[in-house]
Image: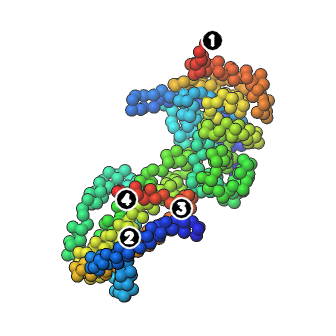
Amino acid sequence: MNRVAVARIGPALFLAVAILAVWQVGVTVSGMPQFILPSPLAIIGVIAGSASLLLRNLVATLEEFGFGLGASILCGVVLGVATAKSRTFAETMYPLLIATQSVPKLALAPLFTVWFGFGLLPKVLIAFLIAFFPITVNTAAGLMSTDPDTLLMARSMGLSAAQRFLKVEVPSALPAVFAGLKVGTAFAVVGAVVGEFLGADAGLGRVTLTASTTLDTPLLFAALTVLAAVGLASYGLVATLEWLLIPWNAEADETATFRASGL
Amino acid sequence: MIDGRANGPSTGSSITVDHVSKIYGTRTGPVDALADVSFTIRAGEFVSLLGPSGCGKSTLLRIIAGLETPTAGTVSIGGRIVEGPQTQLGIVFQSPLLLAWRDALGNVLLQAEARRMDRQKAETTARELIASVGLAGFEHKWPRELSGGMQQRLAICRALLHDPALLLMDEPFGALDALTRDQMNIDLQALWRRGEKTVVFVTHSISEAVFLSDRILVMSHRPGRVVLDATIALARPRRMRMRDTAEFTAYQEQIRTQFARSGVLREEDG
C-alpha cells in the first residue's frame, strides 16, 4: 500500500515542487514587489511568522466547515434516499431543491448576517446550502442506478424490500455517494469562506479579506495556502474513508467525481 | 442439510404448465410472447427448453418462477398454483449477478440470509458446494478476481445452498467460451445426478440440450409454442465423446429438422 501511495502522489508532488521552483525563481529574478506577487519563500515566512494568527482563524473556519459539512452529509444523504425511494418526494420536493441551487449564496449571506448575526451560524448555513446538493444528487443517482437484474435476482431469492435496500442498493450506491461527498466537502470549504467574506469576526476568509484591503499580499497568500491545505486534507480524508469502506473497487473512480461536480 | 422445500417429502418438484399465454404491451403495440403452452414435467426430470432467441423460453422460465404472471393459463409446482415469486426454488440467470462487495463465500451465503438459515450449517454447506464446483480456496476472492465461468459456478452454488427441489437455469452458460461451457455441462450433470432435483434448463444450443436432458421441449419462433417434445434416451452418465455417436447425432438431426420445418434454421438447397 505504501509503495502504491507514493506512486500516486509522486507525480503531483513533483509538479507542485516544479511550479513552486519556477515561481520562486521568476519572482526573485524579475524583482517583483511583494504586494503584487510574493515568492513562495516569503509566503512560508509569513506562515511561520503569523502562525498563531493563522491557527486561530483556521480553527474558526474549520468549525464552520465541520458543522456545515456534517449537516449537509446528514441532510444530503437523507434527501438522496427519499428522492430515490419515493416517487412522491421526487416529484414534489426535488424540483424545489433544484430551485434553491440557482440562488447565489453570496446574495443570501448579508441577509443571514442580519438574521443570525456575525457568529458561527450564518457561515454554517451557507456551507450547508452549497454542500448538500451534490451529496443529494449523487446519493439518489447511485441508488437509482442499481442493476435491475441484480435486484430481480434478489427478489427471486425472497429478500424483502428492506433487505434488498440494505444488502444490494446501498452497497452498490456507495461509490456514487462518495463521489458526492468529495464534491460536497470541497464546496463546504468554499461556503464557509464565502460566508466570512460578508460579515465575520474570525476565520481564514476574514483574514484574506483584511489582507487584500490592506494590500498585505504575502498574508493573503499565506491564508489561501492554508485554505488549500484544508481542502486537500479534507479530500484526502474522504478518499481514505472511501478506500476503507469500498475495498472491492480496484481503484477509486476519479472520473465519477468529475461527473458528480456537475462541471 | 436444511430442507428449504415447500413441497414436503417428495424429492424434486413436478411442474404443470397449463395453457399458458403471455402478451406484452409495448410502445409499438401488443407482443405475443407465448401462445398456449402446455406440458408436464415429472419430479426429478432434467428438461430443456430449446428454441431460437426471442421465442419466449426465458419468459416461460420467469413465469414458472413466479417472477412474471401469465396473461392466460396457470403454472403449478408440486400441485400448488404459482402466485408470486417462488422463493423455494433455485434460479441461475444468464449472468452470474454476484454482488461485487461480497467475497465468494458471502455471495453464496446471501441465499441463507434470505431464508434465515442457521448460519453455521449454511456456511458448512456453502463451503462444501464451493469445493464441489472446484473453487476450494477461492472463498475469499472478490467476484472481479474470478473468471466468468468461476462466477457462474458460484451462482450455481448460491442457487443450491438451500437444497431446492427445483432448479431453473436461464441460458447459464451462454456467455462462456466453448471449452468452459463443455466443462460446465459435465459438472452440471454430475451435480444433478448427486441429488434428485428437477431441472428446467433454457438453452439455444441443440447439442447442449441433448447432452444434458431427459426431455427437450423444442419451441418455435415468437409467439412461442412447444412444437416437439423429444425424449432423450441416452444412457447416463453421458460423456463428451457420446456427442460423436450415431444416437446423439440422430437426436440433433431430429431437432434440426424440426427447426428447419418451423423456419428457425434456413439453408440453401443444393
Relative to A115, is B188 above or below? Answer: above
Q: Which residue is mark 2?
A: A69
Q: Earlier in the sequence, mark 2 or mark 3?
A: 2
Please say if the residues under marks 4 and 3 sit with CB atoms less than 8 Å apart: no
Q: Residue at x 33, y 70 (%)?
A: A190
Tell me the subunit letter for badge 4. Answer: A
Q: Earlier in the sequence, mark 4 or mark 3?
A: 3
Q: CA distance from mark 2 to mark 3?
A: 21 Å
Q: Are marks 2 and 3 on the same chain?
A: yes
Q: CA distance from mark 2 to mark 4?
A: 16 Å
What element does badge 4 sit on?
A: loop
The amino acid at mark 4 is: Ser
Please say if the residues under marks 1 and 4 sit with CB atoms less than 8 Å apart: no
- Tell me the number on the disc at residue A246: 3
> Measured from the top left, where is residue A34 in percent x and y?
29, 80
Residue closest to the eye, A210 or B56: A210
Tell me the subunit letter for badge 3. Answer: A
What element does badge 1 sit on?
A: loop
Q: Earlier in the sequence, mark 2 or mark 4?
A: 2
Q: Which residue is mark 1?
A: B270
Q: Which residue is mark 4?
A: A261
Q: CA distance from mark 4 to mark 3?
A: 20 Å
Tell me the subunit letter for badge 2. Answer: A
Count neighbours of disc 3 (C-alpha within 10 A) and say few if under 14, some if 14 to 19, many if 20 or more.
some
Q: CA distance from mark 1 to mark 3?
A: 61 Å
Q: Residue at x 69, y 20 (%)?
A: B253
Answer with left or right where residue B204 lies relative to residue A35: right
Count neighbours of disc 1 (C-alpha within 10 A) and say few if under 14, some if 14 to 19, many if 20 or more.
few
Q: Nearer the viewer, mark 1 or mark 4?
A: 1
> Measured from the top left, where is residue A76 in percent x and y?
38, 63
